[in-house]
Amino acid sequence: MSILCEVVVKQLIPAVRVRVAKELYNKHNFNQKEIAKRLGLSQPAISKYLSGNYTQEIKKLEEDRIVKKISDEIVKAITKKDFKKSNFEKIIHKFCSNELR
């Protein structure tokens, strides 16, 4: 596995999930169960994200331009109701292949 892939899996994806969860909860009035279902996560994971209970590295990445761009794209798809879990992987893949940078 390349170093970029490791960073994506361990830090970028969690940072994106945090931003998406916060956006859906705070700006679009989704509840924790709805967010968990849309992202394929558990409700306790969403609760953890919303409470800020995650690493400093992820907190720093939350404000990264690329994380914001990826998160905005996911939130937009979810709020349009045409989002499937496979869309999450496609959006992350676009980042890995330099399409979102």
Image: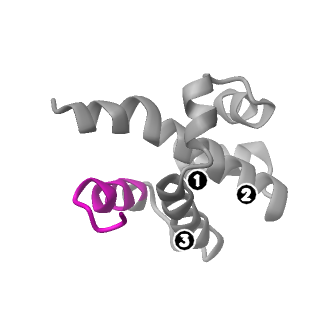
Instruction: Look at the image and say whether residue 16 sits in the magenta stretch.
Output: no
Q: Which residue is mark 3?
A: 77
Q: Residue at x 59, y 72 (%)?
A: 76
Tag 1 secondary structure: helix
Is disc 2 surrounded by few (<14), some (14 to 19) or many (20+) residues within 10 Å? some
Question: Is 75 placed left or right of 95 in the picture?
Answer: right
Q: Residue at x 46, y 61 (%)?
A: 84
- Tell me where the magenta segment starts and ends, as one range: 88-101
Q: CA distance from mark 2 to mark 3?
A: 11 Å
Residue 14 placement (x, y as % from top left): 52, 36
Tag 3 secondary structure: helix
Q: Which mark is residue 24?
A: 2
The amino acid type found where label 2 is placed reads Leu
Residue 15 lies in what quarter of the image? top right
Residue 96 placement (x, y as % from top left): 27, 53
The amino acid type found where label 3 is placed reads Ala
Q: Are marks 1 and 2 in contact (CB under 8 Å)?
A: yes
The mark tally for this picture is: 3
Quarter of the picture holding the C terminus: bottom left
Q: CA distance from mark 1 to mark 2?
A: 10 Å
As drawn, the residue found furthest toward the left would be: 1
Tag 2 secondary structure: helix
- Decide which of tag 2 and tag 3 comes sooner along the chain: 2
Q: Which residue is mark 1?
A: 38
Of badges 3 and 1, nearer the viewer stands 3
Q: Vertical placement of 54 versus 92: above or below?
A: above
The amino acid type found where label 1 is placed reads Arg
Is disc 1 surrounded by few (<14), some (14 to 19) or many (20+) residues within 10 Å? some
